Image (cartoon, rainbow, N blue to C red):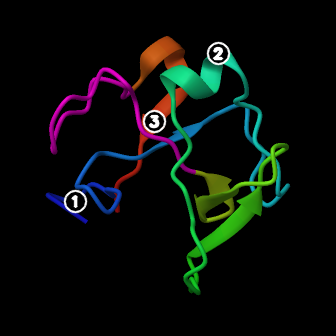
Amino acid sequence: KAGGMRVDSGGMTVYTYDKDTANSGKSACMDQCAKNWPPVKAGDAKVEAPYSTITRDDGSKQLAYNGKPLYTFVKDKKAGDKAGDKVGGVWHAVSD
């Protein structure tokens, strides 16, 4: 957390996508979408609620928060940037 916002291990703001269904275990952001909104990689570390992991179609693990996959945004250049918040009305910075 930083300033009330959820961030990845590099301090970058993380986002959820309205087209993802909570607890479905799937991401609706693939191909070009995932290039602009890189999935937050989960790695092999054990996570505890409210965090979980999903398995993407390519087999990689993605971190989820309250059941929704997490992403960063390519236009965020430094920690604290929130350029992706409310993009297209479907992307939301994750806060407490």
Q: Mark 1 points at which residue?
A: 4
In 3D space, how far apart are the residues under numbered discs 1 and 2 (Cα atoms)?
29 Å
Q: Is the magenta stretch mostly helix, strand or loop?
A: loop
Tell me which label, 3 or 2, sits earlier in the chain: 2
* Residue 85 falls left or right of residue 50: left
- In the figure, residue 28 lies in which quadrant? top right
Q: Measure the C-alpha gap from mark 3 to mark 2.
A: 18 Å
Which is nearer the N-term, disc 1 or disc 2? 1
Numbered label tally: 3
The numbered disc on residue 32 is 2
- Which residue is disc 3 drawn over? 92
Which quadrant is home to the N terminus?
bottom left
Which residue is rendered at x = 73% and y = 40% of the image? 20
> What residue range appears in magenta?
70-85
Q: In which quarter of the image is residue 52?
A: bottom right
**Element class at badge 3:** strand
First reached walking from the N terminus: tag 3 or tag 1: 1
Circle 1/circle 2 CB separation < 8 Å:
no
Q: Where is residue 34 in the image (x, y as percent from the top left)?
A: 61, 28
User: Which numbered circle lies on residue 84?
Assistant: none
